[in-house]
Structure formats: structure tokens, C-alpha cells
Image (tube, rainbow, N blue to C red):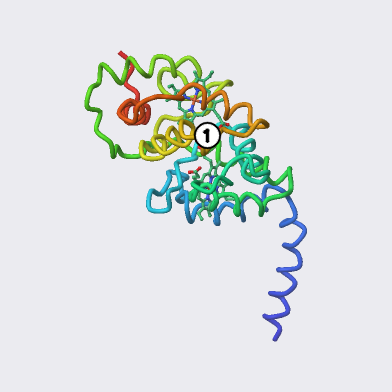
Amino acid sequence: MRARLIGLCLVLLALPAAADPEALAAAHWSGCASCHGEAGEGLRPKEAPGIAAQDAAYIERQMRAFRAGLRGRHPDDGPGSRMTLMAAAISDDAVLAALARRIAAMPAAVAPATLPVEDMARARELYTSCAACHGVAGQGSAAAPRIAGIGDWYLLAQLRKYRDGVRGYLPQDQEGRSMAALVAGMSDADLRAIAAYANAPTPP
Ligand code: HEC
Ligand code: HEC
């Protein structure tokens, strides 16, 4: 009985701390990790990309996009629709910011290659135009997210979504639309080559 009372007191003492955005973000992370992996390395069976070391501002913007239906609402976007449910659960801006900082601070992981680079010279040439925003090593910049290491299968899926009007097609989604315009009309072979290369760029 006494031990139980002490236990209850400890739980009550812990409550104010749990209202702290950092603590709430830490609690949310265990849910995220069930799909994105404990280290944010991505889990292909869940179709969830690597998010560790991703830019915090990009993470926040994507979470808001999922929440607002700018991403993940297209009928052909099954993986995106699962993420919209997760994003809807985090409505507090301070908690979202703390969670994004936490993920951004995780060391970058490199998802193993699942697509072959058949023609390295062609892939490298195609990637030149991407490097202006995503960086020669795919590390990202103020203008574009990190794409290196987050999973070639995920990169290919996103490139197809942009090309096919499943992501980045709404008027309010300016960043998505600009990315979609860049891959409009590209062949599937070229998208495969770029996705394979961009997961692990090897600048000459
Ligand atoms: C049920 C599995 C699941 C859970 C739980 C989950 N995610 Fe996701 N997440 C996904 C999938 C699948 C995608 C890929 C969506 C797509 O293909 O567009 C994704 C995409 C994302 C993206 C976009 C990545 C990018 O590079 O654009 C972010 C950011 C993200 N998730 C953050 C989170 C956070 C933060 C949490 C916890 C609050 C979380 N996810 C929980 C499955 C999940
Ligand atoms: C003008 C700058 C710019 C250029 C050039 C560019 N991108 Fe992007 N890219 C972006 C922005 C901004 C986003 C985020 C779009 C959004 O919010 O949907 C993005 C998103 C992406 C994503 C989704 C990332 C994720 O985590 O979900 C992929 C994949 C991608 N770009 C690949 C490419 C490839 C491949 C090329 C070259 C053919 C390229 N990009 C050229 C700016 C650029």
C-alpha cells in the first residue's frame, strides 16, 4: 500500500515535466520509431523513409503538409495517407518543433541500395541538375531536403508521385509543384537511374 502511494506520488510529480514540449516530443518519437526505425534509419516494410538528420524546417513543413492535406490525400498515395494520420496527432507547434529538432539531430543513416545503378555516367549526368538544390552529395541545402541515404526505393516512389501528379499538384503546395515541374515527362528508366544514384551520390 505504502509503495503504491509512493508510486502514485512519483507519477503525479512527473506530470508537469510531461507537459514540457521536449518530453512530449520524446514520448511521440516512440510512435514514429515503430515505422521509421529506432534510429530514424527508415523501414522499407513500412514504406517509411529514413528521416534521421533531415532538415528540421523541412520536417516541420512536411508534417504540416500532411496535416493540411497538401500531401498524402491523393487516392493513389497509400503510404502518404498513413502518414497523414500520424501528423494529425501532433497539433501543438512547440511539440512539433521539438520533435523536428530531435530527428534532425540524429546521425544520418545510409539505407542499403535496392536498385542497381546500371549506367553510372548517365545517372551522374542526370543528377547534375538536382545537385544545384539537393547538393552534390545529396546532403540538402536551404532550398531542398536531404535525399542521400533515405532509401532509393523511397526516392523512386516520390519521383514517380511528383511526375504522375500524386504529390506536388495542389496550387497551395508551391515547393511540391516546383519539384514536380522538374521531373515532368521524365522516363521511368531515368527516374530509376536518378533514384539509385541519389541515395549514395559519388561525385566525380
Ligand atoms: C504507420 C507508420 C508510420 C508512423 C507511425 C509514422 N510515419 Fe512518418 N511516414 C510513414 C510513411 C509510409 C511515409 C512515406 C509517405 C510517402 O510515401 O509520401 C512517412 C513519411 C514521413 C515524413 C516525410 C519524409 C520525407 O522525406 O519527406 C516525415 C517527416 C515523417 N514521416 C515523420 C514522422 C514522424 C515525426 C512520426 C511520429 C510522429 C511519424 N512519421 C510516424 C509512415 C509512418
Ligand atoms: C530548384 C531546387 C530543386 C531542384 C533543382 C531539385 N529539387 Fe528536388 N526538391 C526540392 C524541394 C523544394 C523539395 C521539397 C518539395 C516538397 O515539399 O514536396 C524537393 C523534394 C525532392 C524529393 C522528395 C524528398 C523527400 O524526402 O520526400 C526528391 C526525391 C527530390 N526532390 C529529388 C530531386 C531530383 C532527383 C532532382 C533532379 C532531377 C531534384 N530533386 C531537383 C527542390 C529541388
Which residue lies under the disc numbered 1? 54
Residue placed at 75% from the left, 64% from the top?
A: 13
Relative to residue 72, is residue 10 drawn left or right? right
Above or below, comparing residue 162 to residue 142 in the picture? below
Quadrant placement of the C terminus: top left
Please state the horizontal and vertical placement of residue 102, each as a whole percent of the image.
59, 41
Q: Quadrant of residue 10?
A: bottom right
Please state the horizontal and vertical placement of residue 180, each as a whole percent of the image.
51, 27
Relative to residue 132, is residue 198 drawn left or right? left
Disc 1: residue Cβ within 8 A of ligand 1's nearest atom: yes
Please state the horizontal and vertical placement of residue 107, each as a whole percent of the image.
47, 36
**Amino acid under disc 1:** Gln
Relative to residue 193, is residue 23 drawn left or right? right
Instruction: Report the residue that reaches farthest toward the bottom.
Output: 1
Q: Secondary structure at mark 1?
A: loop
Relative to residue 186, is residue 19 drawn left or right? right
State the residue in front, 101 or 190. 190
